[in-house]
Image (tube, rainbow, N blue to C red):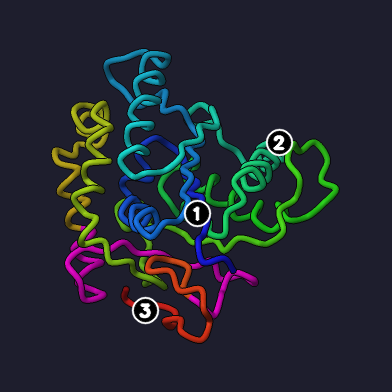
Amino acid sequence: MPEKLTVLAATAHPDDVEVLCAGTLIRYVKEGHKVYIAIACTGNVGSKLHTGLEIEAIRAVEAQRGADVIGAELIMLGYRDGEVWQNNPTWKTYVDLIRRTNPDVIITLDRDDYVHDHSNVGELAYRAAIWASVANIPDTQYPPIDHIPTVFRAETVWMTRVAPPDYYVDITEEFEQKLEACRQHESQYSDFVKKQFGIDDWFEYMTVVSKLRGFQCGCKYAEAFRVEQTWPNHKPYRLLPPVQVNAHSAAPAGSNL
C-alpha cells in the first residue's frame, strides 16, 4: 500500500460531495493524497427557474468551483438526472472510471439513499471495484488496475440510515472550507432546495449533522462512513484520514480520528 493514496469520490449530482464528504476529501488533500470527484449526472432538473440546458451549464461551473475549493480533480460523466441505471453499459462506464483513476479508496453513496441516482451510483461503483482489476472485460477502454480499491459508503442525505457508522473523520479544522465548497452551488441553496424540499437553510442541516457526528466521536465536527462489509474491503490499517497504511501502527476500525 503506497504512503500516498488516490481517492475517488463517486457521487450522483453536483453538490453531493460537498454535502456528504467534502471535509474528508479536504483532509485527504491536506495530507498530500490525490482526490478525484466523479459526478454521474448533469443536474439538469435542479432548478425551478431555468431550462434543463441552462441549469446544466450553471451547475457544471458550480461543480468545478466546488472541486477547486476542495482541491480535487473533477470528472463529469454526463448522465441526465434520473437516468442512472444498473445496466451493463453503465457498469462498464464505472469499470473504466475506476481503471482511469486507479484509486486505492472509493467513497460512494449508500444503497439506501433517497433517490435512485444515489443508490444506483453507489451500487455501480461498488460492483465495479473488483472488476476493474480483472482482464478480458469486453467494450472497456482502459487496462485493468493492479489492486482492488476499498469502498466506503458516505452518509445518507438526512441521515436516514439507523445503523451506526464504522468510521468517523474529524473535520473540525476543515468545516469552514467544506461550507465554502457548498456555497459554490448557489443555484441550489438560493432557490431550488427551498422550493423543492421546503428547506430554508441547508447549511444549518449540514452543521447539525456534522455536530452530531462530532459529538459521537469526541470532536466538534465530523463526517461518518461505513466500510463496505464484503471481502476484501476490510483492511488492518486505516484508509480514511488520518491515513495510516502501516498495519503495525494502524488505529482500530471505528477509531474516532
The Cα atoms of the two marked residues, 1 and 3, are separated by: 20 Å
Amino acid type, mark 2 = Pro
Amino acid type, mark 3 = Ser
Q: Earlier in the sequence, mark 1 or mark 3?
A: 1
Amino acid type, mark 1 = Val
Viewer-proximal residue among 192 and 97: 97
Residue at x-position 38% and y-position 66% = 241
Quarter of the image holding residue 59? Answer: top left
The Cα atoms of the two marked residues, 3 and 2, are separated by: 38 Å
Residue 174 position in % (x across, y down): 24, 55
Q: Given this view, does label 3 or label 2 mark the residue nearer the observer?
A: 3
Q: Given this view, does label 1 or label 3 mark the residue nearer the observer?
A: 1
**Residue beneath disc 1:** 7
At label 1, counting other C-alpha atoms closer than 10 Å, the crowd grade (few under 14, some 14-19, many 20 or more) is many
Q: Quadrant of the C terminus?
A: bottom left
Residue 165 position in % (x across, y down): 38, 70
Residue at x-position 71% and y-position 53% = 145
Quarter of the image holding residue 47? Answer: top left
- The answer to whether 47 appears left or right of 194 in the picture is right
**Residue beneath disc 3:** 255
**Residue beneath disc 2:** 89
Disc 1 to disc 3: CB gap under 8 Å: no
Write down the region rendered in magenta.
Answer: 209-237
Residue at x-position 27% and y-position 41% = 181
Residue 122 falls within the magenta-colored stretch:
no
Query: Which element carries disc 2, helix, strand or loop?
Result: helix
